[in-house]
Image (tube, grey):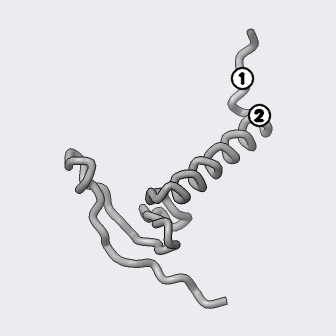
Amino acid sequence: MSAANIFSEEFARATAAAGLRARRTALASGHGVVFVDESGRYVEELPDGTMLEVSLQPGAPRETHLRIIGEISTPVK
């Protein structure tokens, strides 16, 4: 069995595609998704499209580990 080359373009594309599928599945199932945006903020995307800036509370129970800082408004195009 050969080892996967994690530095290959193919691996990078497969990893990105898997992440996008997981995000879509979570949102479709009614779960929010937390990620770090291009500005370095922790963002929670909710199934209805709402985007919240959040902070993580280490050691807090799962139900309370996110603290909402505020809603992120989407720029008008």
Q: Report x, y in % for residue 47.
A: 49, 66
CB-based contact (under 8 Å), mark 2 and mark 1: yes
Q: Say which of marks 2 and 1 sits in front.
A: 1
Quadrant position of residue 64: bottom left
**x and y percentages locating residue 25 in the rendered image:** 57, 51
Please state, as top left, top right, bottom left or bottom right, where the C terminus lies in the image. bottom right
How busy is the neighbourhood of tag 2: few (under 14 within 10 Å), some, or many (20 plus)?
A: few
Residue designated by label 2: 8
Q: Secondary structure at mark 2?
A: loop
The N terminus - image quarter: top right
Instruction: Specify whether 12 is left or right of 39.
Output: right
Picture disc at residue 56: none
* SS type, badge 1: loop
Q: Nearer the viewer, residue 61 or 69?
A: 61
Question: Given the image, on which type of amino acid does mark 1 rest?
Answer: Ala
Q: At 35% across and 77% down in the image, what residue appears?
A: 70
Instruction: In this rendered view, identify the residue nearer to me: 74 or 9.
Output: 74
Q: Please give the residue where the numbered disc 1 appears in the rendered image.
A: 4
Q: Which residue is found at the position 52% from the left and 72% from the top?
A: 49
Q: Vertically, is 31 above or below 12?
A: below
Q: Give, as a three-letter code, the residue at label 2.
A: Ser
Query: Crowding near pointer 1: few (<14 within 10 Å), some, many (20+)?
Result: few
Residue for point 79% across, 37% down? 10
Is residue 9 left or right of 48 when viewed as pictured? right
Vertical comparison of 38 with 58: above or below: below
- Residue 14 % position (x, y): 72, 40
Is the residue 29 above or below the residue 5 in the image?
Answer: below
Q: Position of residue 28 (x, y in %)?
A: 55, 58
